[in-house]
Image: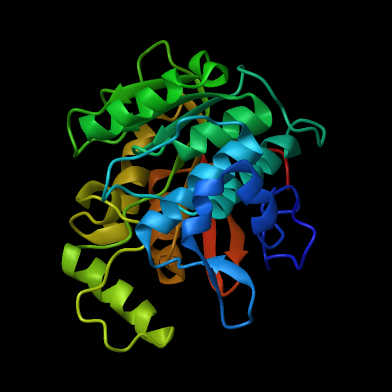
Amino acid sequence: MANQKHKSGLHPRNKHKGQYDFNELLKHNPKLQAFIIKNKQGQQSIDFFDPIAVKMLNKTLLSYYYAIQNWDIPDHYLCPPIPGRADYIHHIADLLAKENDGLIPKGKKIRVLDIGVGANCIYPIIGVKEYAWSFVGVDINKASLQNAHAIVLNNKTLRSNIELRWQEHSEHIFKGIITAKDNFTLSICNPPFHASAEEAKMEALRKLKNLGKKNVIEPTLNFGGQQHELWCKGGELQFLKQMITQSKSVASSVRWFTTLVSKEAHLKPTYKLLKKVGVAYTNTISMGQGNKKSRLLVWSFIPQTMD
């Protein structure tokens, strides 16, 4: 479907590389029509600062590309952009291919721990649909897990590949989740970006003003998000430090630890901590979509022979 101009920076296997073909999407979900507008270039689009429009687009994309039915999330919960989530999955697939003679390993034998699966369950959905991997999704919020569970139950192809677990103690990331019998190929995470609700609002306001919407005083977070999804004490850097420190205690249970890092300035202190805890391998994988740049931080306590 995506046969128009490619979105800059997306992974070559990403199904969302091209501009959205809204005519095709409308055939699949006519309800999307109510949210379609014309952008400054006169092309069909949606208002990406309207969380309801973003949710309807996500429902359509998940149905069209991944055959996911009855996907939904509660109001004000994180509704992430699908292309960026798909990029993460494809990049870690490349990571696994490097130690598998260049072939991406597929099937349930690849076990992925999703830290902060959220109500949307997006990473497991894409990982199952693209590579048939198995997932354990973890969250501290019971309502998020209940919604993710409903998504899994509503889709037969997900049921045998996705397990959900509640993290009772918010100060722990791995403890209480990984059991003695668990052995994960890798862990994935999209950490909370901000240190407070106010910081999250200010960032949304800054983005709106950059887009010419200068009269907005109380911004709406276009992709939604609850407190545990968007901010935590100390923000992203503190969360990363916590994850790295705690990863050492489960070093033999997870072959690859990975996480998104939204701010490049956070790489230097995290690399310093990785060296301190004694990891055997570290790497940073660059990611980007348009003007937005991000990166995946990768580490392992198991010595690696690949480049």
Q: Residue at x 37, y 13 (%)?
A: 180
**Viewer-proximal residue among 29 and 84:** 29
Q: Is residue 193 above or below residue 152?
A: below
Q: Residue furthest top?
A: 181
Q: Position of residue 34 (x, y in %)?
A: 47, 58
Q: Establish if 237 lies above or below 87.
A: below
**Residue 93 percent coordinates (x, y):** 66, 38
Dividing the picture into quarters, in which one does residue 261 lie?
A: bottom left
In this figure, what is the number of numbered marks?
A: 0
Q: Quadrant of residue 243?
A: top left
Q: Picture coordinates of residue 289 (x, y %)?
A: 60, 65
The answer to which of 204 and 169 lies nearer the viewer is: 204
At a point 64% along the width and 57% down the height, the residue shown is: 22
The answer to which of 21 and 268 lies nearer the viewer is: 21
Q: Position of residue 194 (x, y in %)?
A: 27, 62
In the rendered image of this protein, does residue 104 appear above or below residue 241? Answer: above
Residue 298 in view in this figure: no
| Residue at position x 60%, y 64% in the image | 288
